[in-house]
Amino acid sequence: MLGKLSFRNAKRQALNYIIYFITVTISIGLIFSFNFLAFSKDVSELSNQMEYFKQVIVILSIIIAFSIAWLINYTMKFILEKRSKEFAIYQILGIEKKDISSMFVKENIIIGAIALMFGILLGMFLYQVLISIVMNIFKQPYQINIVFSYKALLLTILYFVLIYGIIILKNRKKIKKSKVYELLYSEKQNENHVMRKVKYNKIIFAFSVILLLVSIFVVKYTFSFGSNVSFNLVLIALISLIVGIYLFYISISGFILDFYINNKRRKYKNSNMFLYRNLASKVNTMSITMSTLAVMFVIIIIGLNISMLMNNMLNNEMEILYPFEIMISTTDGDFTKYKEYIKKNSDVVNMHEYKIYTIEQTPLIEALKDTSLRDRKYNKVDNVIKLSDYNKLREMIGYSSVELSNDEIIVNTISTASNYINKYIKENGNYITACNKKYKIKQVEDINLGQLGFNGFVYFFVVNDNEIEFIKENEISSDYLSNNLEYKLVVNTKEKTTQAFYDDLCSYIKTYHFPQVGIYDGIEKEYDVEISLGNVLSRGQRIGETKSFYTIISFSAIYVSLILIMISATLLAIQQLSESEKYKYRYKVLKDLGMDEMDMNKIIFKQIFIYFLLPILIPVLISVPIVLSIGNIFTLAVTYKEIIKNICFVFGIFFLVYSIYFVATDVQFEKNINEEI
Amino acid sequence: MENLLVVDSIQKYYGSKENITKAINDISFSVNSGEFIGIMGASGSGKTTLLNCISTIDNVSSGHIYLENKDITKINDEDIAKFRRENLGFIFQDFNLLDTLTVEENIALILTINKVLQKDIDNKVFELALKLGIDDILNKYPYQISGGQRQRCAVARAIINNPKLILADEPTGALDSKSARQLLDILKEMNEKLKVTILMVTHDPFCASYCNKILFLKDGRIFNKIEKGDKTQKEFYNNILDVLSLLGGDFRDVR
Ligand SMILES: Nc1ncnc2c1ncn2[C@@H]1O[C@H](COP(=O)(O)OP(=O)(O)OP(=O)(O)O)[C@@H](O)[C@H]1O
Ligand SMILES: [Mg+2]
């Protein structure tokens, strides 16, 4: 009979806590599918870098396991509280405490086992979806096939059993210690947490706001210097952010009360009094949980944004850095060996050989002075290409040619820099002085022709072929830049270059050795210095790497954030729903006092809405400026528009998942309140 | 006749040092086997507290309670469950049936814990259900039956294991007068035929008139004690009303 009881209780519990049950199931599904994916041979064979995927996923799974443990523990606590009367009856009927607790354990094992089973089924399905996405990213053919990974399964079960086991044991102890009287009357006890009087409420509140602002400004300051970010400053920002959030939520409940209760007119408007009393007392007891959720939300939102920024950067850099399939630079202009190999081993579509000239830095650098792009022009020179070469490069990637008179110049830059340059031109006139000669800027182009390292840095200039003799006279000597890779060869081939092709090409790079004397381990030593006199870039080789990192970053980010959002929202849902029993009585009083159901549902909606809104309020407000600041160091390759797009996308996903939980909670809450006992 | 239950100068305090409520302030009485005792008193007079102490739900602050000469205030934690299921039956004001079990299972639960054979359980449950008029709803769930039926189910659950003492806290509180009367008839019959000892807390003088002895509590003390003797139920009822009007409080206007 007790077994039967366990089973039915489990069923009822699962139904009552359907939101929780679904969350746990989905989480298990996600854990399983991602571990499955990480251990999949198909995936690890995609590229060398995919090995990291396994490590990342396993580490993240541990973090996730802890979060799930938090959720389960929290829910278990609520379930125990809610069922205290039932446990009291068992005791009064003379059932031994050890039987009661083993019944509880059985119930939870049943629920857990079902969630685990469904989760793994779901995970197997999710795995198929995930792997086809990965294969699609790598443009590999893939057919759905039923495979199974015992490693992933064992790992998932291990996480689950550990979490569940510990929590069940903990709660079993709690039941064994419980007293009938307390269980029986706990329901009737008033919420005995008298509003914690936060004494210096206003001061704490003001302080929290200051801390939050400080964190925003420290982040803004820290990330305004380009890529060399100070770790200490980030730490300061992080600490003030976290402390600020906690203080904010601790002090806010007092404010809700002050605001609505101490103001008679507002107090009696509609059912405000009822609503805000409920709310303030709840927020007060929940402030720590709410703060923790808020901190988590900030981390999720910022983390997702950073991961998207990194992906944008990878993608955009790919385009900026590799406009041609093969890009070779040398110091001597001797490309014969390379060309031989390329012609022999691939179908050349087009090819061009040219020289890029190095001149002294022009005042145009001023245009970039407040941006992180300035870092990229560290060698304090500018570069020039002649018009015929420029037109040839354009033609190779499908652009029409341009014309230029002798005293005109074209600035070819990257799209993120073109805004600054245009602005500079607007303010300082349409002329530029290069090699002490004034040129008229004909146009600013942002076609990707490798101007991030291959053809100059951030931008290069184009002059008429007639001008090139003059430029040559002013060229900075090669001695100054000891291995100036000024001769270029760019090739487009029909097929994609492979890693092996790239490795072969690299073997033709000439090197220059010379001995140098230096102090090494305190002993003066002579050692050999090797300098490469060439450099090879190949798009095909790079794309494999890019795609691996792209996959690792986006999959991990989605994995963690999805589960964390779900867990947090479930926590809020459970919190509200478990209270619905208690509220049932309060709402019944309202009903008896003559409030109709519509109005009541409105209050319920309002209550749950505010409740769900509070923990995301600060994260949303604070993460936007922080993400914008962090985006600063990505501006090299990521445009402002893309950053904004990312923010919208992240909020979109976040709110979608979050509001599903909100609506589900609202519906379930109304159902709980309105159903007769 | 032997004393089944002896309550020996018990006290029960609630609250902290600064703010003490004396819910029971020195109560002593004894109950003979087979008696049907009523406990009456104004709200807050300590009735529920007294019942909770006797039923081991709550601990006394001082004093002793003996059931068949065994001091139940001294039973340790391991033995308490066994003690409860072998000696006590409870009927609560608000039924407290387990809503995941059917009526039949609710009644049989305690027998299965006592490891009675399944066949005997079935017979016993059916017999009792027949007697209480709930044999036709045995397979229903508590939320599918009426309040009166639920309360009868609670009675069945309380007496199925032949407890020495049945404790009832306002068992008719949630019932209409017809169902209440039915229930009291059942309790009375059990008391008379099966010689079950019953301790019943009630607010209602009519209910109390079913008892053969009534204790009146006031501010945690026994204020008065009356016995039915050979009075008719109607005479006893009037007797109760007289005491209640003496007692004052919220009973003054019942007549
Ligand atoms: N847990 C508790 N903490 C503090 N005081 C309590 C507690 N339980 C009961 N009391 C107090 O003890 C006194 C007796 O309470 P009790 O519940 O026994 O009254 P009662 O006679 O059953 O009343 P009613 O007829 O209303 O049920 C009351 O004054 C009550 O306020
Ligand atoms: Mg009472």
Image: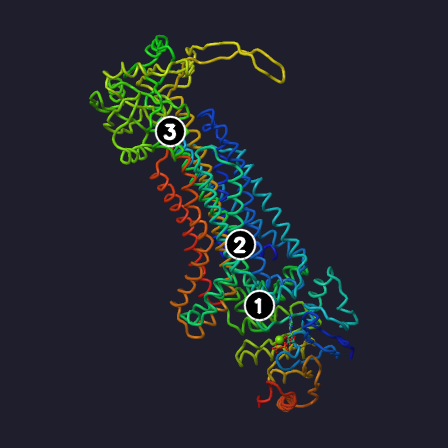
Residue A441 in the image: x percent, y percent? Answer: 25, 27
- Quadrant in the rendering for residue A177: bottom right
Which residue is label 3 attached to? Answer: A317
Output the chain of dot 1. A
Which residue is label 2 attached to? Answer: A247
Image vertical order of residue A33 relative to residue B105, above or below:
above
Please identify, in this view, whether the residue under mark 1 or under mark 2 is nearer the observer.
Answer: 2
Q: Earlier in the sequence, mark 1 or mark 2?
A: 1
Does the residue tagged 3 have its C-beta within 8 Å of any atom of ligand 1? no
* Real-space CA distance between mark 3 and mark 2, rounded to the nearest whole angstrom: 41 Å
Q: Is residue A435 visible?
A: yes
Please identify, in this view, whether the residue under mark 1 or under mark 3 is nearer the observer.
Answer: 3
Which residue is label 1 attached to? Answer: A190
Q: Amino acid at mark 3?
A: Glu
Q: Earlier in the sequence, mark 3 or mark 2?
A: 2
Disc 1: CA contacts within 10 A as few (<14), some (14-19) or many (>=20):
few
* Residue B144's disc number: none
Image vertical order of residue A426 relative to residue A481, above or below:
below
Residue A454 in the image: x percent, y percent? Answer: 36, 21
Image vertical order of residue A458 relative to residue A333, above or below:
below
